[in-house]
């Protein structure tokens, strides 16, 4: 490639970068998505927790009910239970939508500090955080529940750092920085 061609390519890249930047400034994103994932094994979860608790289409990627507890107790909670992404940086006014693409229910509960949820056997020894205490018998916790295939939208987040975790699987955590 000769020098003129190189320069042309560079200029094109710079113009493209400039255009992208302008677009980003003109249209700030109004919605940021978080996905909740799990790979619960329908056979063993439903045997333990009741019919239709786990509606996952696991396609071989499943974790059994007993294994999930064993992994959590060993301090290596199952990474297939996950909120993605783990951190979000958004502008004030942006809504956060959380979609449960897993097979079982989760919660998206704002907590002051990360810690254990309300299922002691999944806490890996961490004490239950106050925001999860009482489980679904507590209205405030039940309101943060997300069922399989549904989503919740979090709006009105103030500037600063917000922490959300699942009160059932407390290693599912998201930090949202609002600027
Ligand atoms: Cu969960």
Image (tube, rainbow, N blue to C red):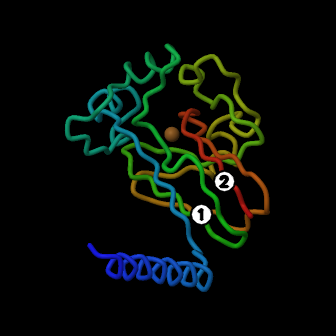
Q: Residue furthest front?
A: 3
Query: Marks 2 and 1: CB-CB under 8 Å?
Result: yes
* Residue picked out by circle 1: 96
**Residue under pointer 2:** 176
Looking at the rendered structure, the secondary structure element under dot 2 is strand
Instruction: Give the image location of residue 120, x and y in percent.
Output: 60, 22
Left/right placement of residue 173 relative to residue 74 reads: right
- Give me the residue at 37% from left, 20% from top: 67
Residue 47 sits in quarter: top left
Give the residue drawn at x 50%, y 79%. Answer: 20
**Measuring 65% from the left and 46% from the top, which residue is drawn there?**
164
Q: Position of residue 80 (x, y in %)?
A: 39, 36
Q: Where is residue 175 in the image (x, y as percent from the top left)?
A: 65, 48
* Pointer 2 or 1: first along the chain: 1
Q: Relative to 114, is 166 on the left or the right?
A: left
Q: Is mark 2 within 8 Å of ligand 1?
A: no
């Amino acid at each position: 490639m000769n020098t003129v061609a190189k320069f042309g390519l560079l200029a094109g890249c710079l113009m493209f970068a400039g255009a992208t930047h302008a677009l980003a400034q003109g249209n700030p994103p109004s919605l940021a998505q978080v996905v909740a994932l799990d790979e619960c094994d329908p056979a063993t979860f439903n045997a333990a927790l009741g019919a239709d608790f786990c509606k996952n289409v696991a396609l071989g990627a499943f974790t059994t009910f007993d294994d999930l507890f064993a992994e959590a107790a060993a301090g290596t909670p199952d990474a297939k239970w996950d909120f993605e992404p783990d951190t979000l940086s958004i502008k004030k006014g942006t809504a956060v939508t959380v979609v449960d693409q897993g097979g079982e229910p989760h919660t998206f509960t704002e907590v002051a500090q990360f810690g254990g949820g309300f299922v002691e056997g999944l806490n890996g020894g961490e004490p239950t955080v106050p925001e999860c205490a009482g489980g679904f018998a507590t209205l405030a916790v039940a309101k943060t529940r997300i069922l399989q295939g549904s989503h919740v939208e979090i709006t009105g987040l103030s500037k600063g750092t917000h922490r959300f975790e699942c009160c059932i699987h407390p290693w599912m955590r998201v930090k949202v920085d609002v600027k």
